[in-house]
Image (tube, rainbow, N blue to C red):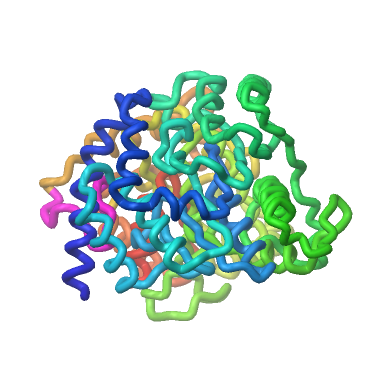
């Protein structure tokens, strides 16, 4: 089965380069073909019968979908969840009742779709999702838009039960437009005539466009409020970060509308002062890898504790200026709340050290290191300043920055892709460019006052070499506690997770 699975992944990968080229020039002229593809896949009726929640947005749509799925599953319904991208394995995109589909089920439905259609990876994936949901008779399908909305393959959904738009910002501008209004117009493309829609508070320009699009289609558009944590009855959101209260608020509204519209409310009282127990359980049990995730590295052959130090990865797939600012706030908070860090602050209070000296407690040091990469379509001059300045405002300065290419090739969907074995064959021109942005940032006039607090930076030809360097650094200084923020790319986050779990 392993060979067959690898063959399926290679087939799927073969379509991605073609899709990437088309996406940059597609203004909708090919979108109508998606409906023809559905007919070929014999999925028109199956998808039309699904009771779908459709979610678009720039930031938080994956979290919103995850919260929504968990809520409705805890309400007793069979759920199907279709998201993108995946971190490690393409099957993460297709979840039934909260669990990714098995390899044999994936293969069965993949070859069924592949033998009928070998044109577009996005519609093959949507077709797979439709097959999984239809054949397993789910009660609700939660569908995350891949890119944009108006011309995204998931927009073959004609009659969803409810639509949601998470926070909007500047991302994929080469495809979606250069202004928030243009981007909002693309996202609002999932609105359907008369179908209720919910969104979070948006920048004025974006909100104006959403309201105009909704009015044109007779869509009752409403704006949610962030979840009041007090409604969780001493529980905590399953996804960490202050921003998740907004995504949870959107998920509550989407779930409520779905329950009401499908006649499944069953007397549950849902308002700003009360959440049913099923909603509380769903919100607290939700999980999504690669978003505000903390993982200790166990490869060092030691139990990491406050006495021995160790290596901990803080992973977040933020890749826009706004999301990197949120990521920086989260990282600054969680390392501050770490028990060993709290002990360190008490020690520093009683044993002051000169400014800029490495944090220490009883000979132990806390070092914050950045492990970063971003795709070449993004602008590191917009990304890195938001990250660095926000961390600095919260008292966090990186002692070293590491820049690496992703372990898996961008055009691979599988879990076994790897870079060339010869470091000389790796093109590091982009990583060197990002490194120059970093060096200019911390030595600029704006950052000159804190430049001495930052260490240098390194470019590694592969991610395994960077991880080895980190591990060797800890082994050389057994009292060090290294806290590594991994961000800038979901692909990078997935590759780190894959490697540290081997």
- Residue 413 visible: yes
Question: Which residue occupies 32% across, 65% down?
Answer: 499
Q: Could you say where residue 322 lies in the image, as x and y percent from the top left?
A: 56, 35
- Residue 458 visible: no
Residue 473, placed above or below residue 462: below
Question: Which residue occupies 27% across, 43% down?
Answer: 120
Q: Is residue 420 magenta?
A: yes
Q: Could you say where residue 348 lies in the image, as x and y percent from the top left?
A: 68, 58
Q: Could you say where residue 123 lies in the image, as x and y percent from the top left?
A: 33, 45
- The image quadrant where one finds the C terminus is bottom left
Main SS, magenta residues: loop
Q: Residue lying furthest right in this view?
A: 273
- State left or right for residue 253 relative to residue 17: right
Q: Nearer the viewer, residue 195 or 231?
A: 195
Numbered range of the magenta stretch: 407-423
Q: Could you say where residue 281 lies in the image, as x and y percent from the top left?
A: 71, 68
Q: Is residue 345 magenta?
A: no
Q: Nearer the viewer, residue 445 or 85?
A: 85
């Amino acid at each position: 089965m392993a060979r067959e699975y690898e063959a399926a992944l290679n087939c799927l990968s073969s379509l991605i380069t073609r899709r990437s080229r088309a996406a940059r020039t597609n203004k909708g002229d090919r979108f109508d073909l998606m409906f023809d593809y559905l007919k070929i896949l014999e999925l028109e009726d199956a998808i039309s019968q699904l009771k779908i929640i459709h979610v678009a947005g720039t930031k938080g749509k994956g979290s919103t979908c995850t919260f929504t799925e968990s809520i409705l599953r805890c309400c007793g319904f069979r759920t199907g969840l279709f998201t993108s991208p995946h971190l490690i394995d393409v099957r993460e995109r297709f979840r039934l009742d909260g669990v990714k589909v098995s390899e044999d089920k994936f293969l069965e439905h993949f070859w069924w779709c592949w033998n009928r259609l070998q044109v577009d990876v996005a519609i093959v994936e949507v077709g797979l999702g439709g097959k999984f949901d239809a054949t397993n008779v789910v009660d609700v399908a939660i569908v995350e838009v891949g890119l944009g909305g108006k011309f995204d393959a998931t927009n073959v959904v004609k009659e969803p039960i409810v639509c949601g738009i998470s926070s909007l910002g500047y991302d994929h501008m080469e495809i979606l437009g250069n202004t928030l209004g243009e981007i909002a117009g693309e996202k609002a493309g999932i609105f359907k005539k008369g179908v209720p829609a919910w969104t979070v508070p948006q920048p004025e320009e974006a909100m104006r466009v959403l309201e105009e699009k909704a009015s044109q289609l007779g869509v009752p558009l409403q704006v949610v409020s962030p979840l009041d944590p007090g409604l969780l009855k001493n529980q905590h959101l399953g996804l960490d970060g202050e921003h998740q209260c907004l995504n949870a608020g959107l998920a509550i509204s989407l779930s409520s509308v779905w329950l009401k519209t499908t006649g499944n409310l069953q007397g549950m009282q849902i308002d700003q002062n009360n959440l049913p127990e099923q909603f509380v359980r769903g919100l607290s049990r939700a999980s999504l890898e690669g978003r505000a995730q903390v993982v200790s590295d166990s490869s060092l052959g030691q139990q990491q504790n406050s006495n021995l130090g160790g290596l901990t990865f803080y992973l977040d797939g933020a890749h826009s200026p706004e999301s990197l600012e949120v990521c920086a706030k989260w990282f600054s908070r969680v390392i501050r709340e770490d028990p060993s860090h709290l002990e360190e602050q008490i020690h520093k209070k009683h044993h002051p050290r000169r400014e800029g000296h490495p944090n220490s407690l009883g000979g132990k040091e806390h070092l914050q290191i950045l492990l970063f990469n971003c795709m070449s379509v993004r602008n590191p001059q917009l990304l890195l300043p938001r990250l660095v300045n926000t961390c600095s405002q919260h008292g966090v300065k990186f002692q070293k920055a590491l820049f690496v290419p992703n372990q898996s090739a961008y055009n691979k969907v599988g879990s076994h892709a790897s870079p060339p074995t010869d470091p000389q064959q790796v093109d590091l021109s982009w990583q060197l460019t990002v490194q120059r942005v970093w060096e200019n940032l911390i030595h600029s006039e704006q950052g000159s006052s804190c430049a001495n607090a930052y260490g240098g930076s390194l470019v590694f030809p592969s991610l395994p070499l960077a991880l080895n360097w980190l591990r060797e650094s800890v082994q050389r200084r057994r009292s060090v506690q290294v806290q590594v923020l991994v961000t800038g790319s979901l692909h990078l986050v997935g590759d780190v997770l894959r490697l540290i779990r081997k």
